[in-house]
Image (cartoon, rainbow, N blue to C red):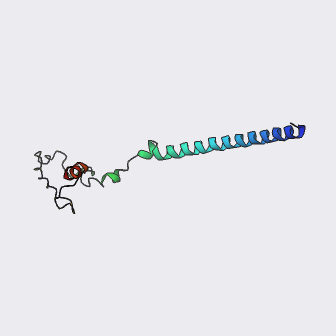
Amino acid sequence: MTPARAQELLEENARLRAELEKANIELRLLREKIDLMLARLFDKKSEAIDPSQLELFDPEGAKKPSAAEPADRAPAAATPAPAKKRATRSPRRGSGGHHRQTLSDRNRAA
């Protein structure tokens, strides 16, 4: 190996090491940004519920009783609602109630 080639390889090695260090710094910064964004999205503070959001699920239940309404009203009837009868499934379209032919059926017919 000539001294010029050795010098060229040393310079390339130094350049590649500098690029690698730069890439590692950028990678570290990007990971910190991702961690910060995830913390903003999923931290306890971001999981806070606005009381008005509860009205979407139960408009009457989310409202607190006012002073004008008596707080000791009797609760609604404790008897459960009668269970609805489940509908039976109709056959799939196109099946026509026909038996699907399998390989073993084909072998028997042959």
Q: Is residue 109 left or right of residue 24?
A: left
Q: Residue furthest right?
A: 3
Q: Is residue 58 left or right of residue 14?
A: left
Q: Is residue 46 left or right of residue 52?
A: right
Position of residue 66 measured from the top left corner of the image (x, y, whole percent): 25, 51
Position of residue 40 measured from the top left corner of the image (x, y, whole percent): 50, 46
Residue 88: which quarter of the image?
bottom left
- The foreground one among 102 and 96 is 102
Residue at 14% across, 53% down: 86
- The foreground one among 13 and 91 is 91
Residue 44: which quarter of the image?
top left
Residue 100: which quarter of the image?
bottom left
Position of residue 77 measured from the top left corner of the image (x, y, whole percent): 11, 47
In the image, residue 107 above or below residue 3: below
Position of residue 67 measured from the top left corner of the image (x, y, whole percent): 24, 50
- The foreground one among 10 and 63 is 10
- The foreground one among 52 and 7 is 7
Q: Is residue 92 left or right of residue 11?
A: left
Look at the image and tell me in which quarter the N terminus lies. top right
Residue at 23% across, 52% down: 106
Q: How many marks?
A: 0
